[in-house]
Amino acid sequence: MEIPSQLKVGPFVYQVKQVELVNKGKPELIGEVKHDVQKAILVDNSLDLDTKQSVFLHELIHCVDMFMRIGLEEKQVEQLEHGLYMVLKDNSLLKDW
Ligand SMILES: [Zn+2]
């Protein structure tokens, strides 16, 4: 899966940026999503491809959660990230993205 430069979620367009530092105040973060006016997904550019794809999927789930007003907890987002990533990877569905 190639990480796109933009992600459309309903009427919203998130700019996807691969950056050196995701959040200055929280240097341990490897991914983050901003739902404010400047919608953006930030992914640590030093990660290996597998982790990058998984982190991107995680932030994508946050976007869908926000748009659909599901109200997922962080732990549920992590579980969906790992479960979906596992199935996509195991069925070779990430290759052609
Ligand atoms: Zn999260």
Image: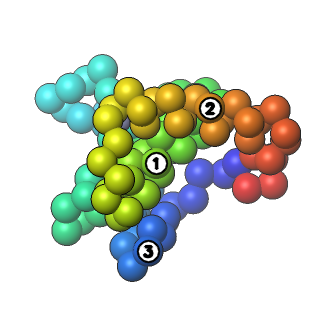
- Compute the Cα span from label 1 to label 2: 12 Å
Residue under the point 85% across and 39% down: 91
Give the structural element (helix, strand or loop) at label 1.
helix
- Compute the Cα span from label 1 to label 3: 13 Å
Say which mark, if any, is on residue 83: 2
Residue 7 image position (x, y, % from top left): 49, 64
Q: Disc 1 or 3, which lies upstream in sequence?
A: 3
Residue under the point 14% across and 29% down: 25
Q: In terms of image quarters, where does ligand 1 lie?
A: top left
Residue 95 appears in view? yes
Residue at the far bottom in the pictured view: 11
Q: Which amino acid does label 3 sit on?
A: Gly
Residue 28 image position (x, y, % from top left): 30, 20
Q: Disc 1 or 2, which lies upstream in sequence?
A: 1
Residue 7 is left or right of residue 90, and the answer is left
Residue 90 image position (x, y, % from top left): 81, 32
**Way the structure is coloured:** rainbow
Say which mark, if any, is on residue 61: 1
